[in-house]
Image (cartoon, rainbow, N blue to C red):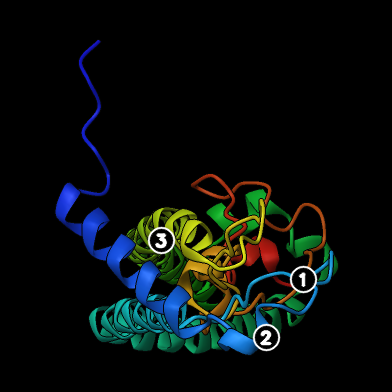
């Protein structure tokens, strides 16, 4: 197994250590205050200029990734919104035509093989619903893939910034006067950025579930595997 490359190069490490010494020098108390006793629970200030700059840079990077994601998926999101509306209209039309039939004429075999305008219209609606549902699944997969890539890039930038903070913080503690002891390095806040999302792209998707269930037997002879995507016939009440 080969050696792993350094995540932070020597030049970046040297720069971080120099900034740590500068921040520690700026945070050093006045000369007359050094003679006063230091409280046992005193800890160094976390919001140093370098940590604040790293946090702002990571937030800006995550915002750029989020904007790039929306710019690339705007057309897909708009098409998905239109598909949701079209699927809802088709499902309503299917329900209306199905209710117009007698209860004995609503069996799956009768709908699949029956003659007449009503059965032809039901089969046409089923084919159109299946096509639109398949397209919605394709759009959902594409949007999720792009979102995952953007989230991974933002998370990787935050991870690299956390490693920089670890190098900076160790040098900062060594340069403090009086020494602060062992204090854990602060971590960047990710909750308000793309890197802090945990529910994939569903938090932004415009397609919402149209319903929660359908009477048993109506889609017993569906030509394809039932889908549970929002707007599918099997997710319709």
Return the mark for residue 33. 2
Question: According to the image, label 3 marks what residue?
Answer: 168
Q: Position of residue 125 (x, y in %)?
A: 49, 73
Q: CA distance from mark 2 to mark 1?
A: 14 Å
1 or 3: mark nearer the eye: 1
For the point 28% across and 66% down, which residue is it? 18
Is residue 227 shown above or below 191?
above
**Looking at this rendering, what residue extends furthest in the left direction?**
11
Q: Which of the 4 quarters of the picture holds residue 97?
A: bottom right
For marks 2 and 1 on the same chain, the one whose residue lies earlier in the sequence = 2
In the picture provided, is 20 more to the left or to the right than 1?
Answer: right
Please name whichever residue, 218 or 207, is drawn nearer the observer in this view of the structure.
207
* Coordinates of residue 32 in the picture (x, y in percent): 64, 88
Q: Residue at 37% of width from left, 66% of height from top?
A: 154
Residue 79 visible at all: yes
**Which of the two discs, 2 and 3, labels the residue nearer the N terminus?**
2
Q: Which residue is mark 1?
A: 42
Which corner quadrant holds the N terminus? top left
């Amino acid at each position: 197994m080969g050696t792993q490359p350094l995540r932070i190069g020597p030049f970046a490490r040297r720069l971080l250590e120099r900034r740590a010494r500068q921040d520690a020098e700026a945070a050093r108390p006045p000369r007359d205050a050094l003679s006063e006793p230091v409280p046992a629970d005193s800890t160094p200030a976390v919001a140093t200029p370098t940590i604040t700059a790293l946090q702002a840079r990571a937030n800006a990077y995550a915002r750029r990734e989020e904007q790039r994601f929306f710019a690339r998926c705007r057309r897909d999101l708009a098409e998905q919104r239109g598909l949701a509306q079209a699927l809802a209209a088709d499902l309503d039309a299917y329900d209306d035509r199905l209710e117009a039939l007698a209860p004995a004429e609503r069996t799956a075999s009768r709908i699949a093989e029956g003659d007449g305008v009503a059965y032809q219209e039901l089969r046409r609606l089923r084919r159109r619903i299946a096509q639109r549902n398949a397209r919605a699944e394709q759009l959902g997969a594409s949007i999720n893939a792009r979102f995952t890539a953007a989230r991974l890039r933002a998370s990787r930038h935050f991870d690299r910034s956390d490693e920089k903070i670890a190098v900076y913080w160790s040098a900062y503690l060594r340069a403090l006067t009086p020494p602060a002891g062992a204090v854990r390095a602060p971590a960047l806040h990710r909750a308000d950025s793309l890197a802090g999302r945990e529910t994939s792209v569903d938090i932004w998707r415009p397609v919402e579930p149209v319903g929660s269930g359908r009477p048993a037997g109506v889609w017993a002879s569906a030509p394809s595997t039932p889908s549970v995507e929002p707007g599918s016939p099997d997710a319709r009440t």
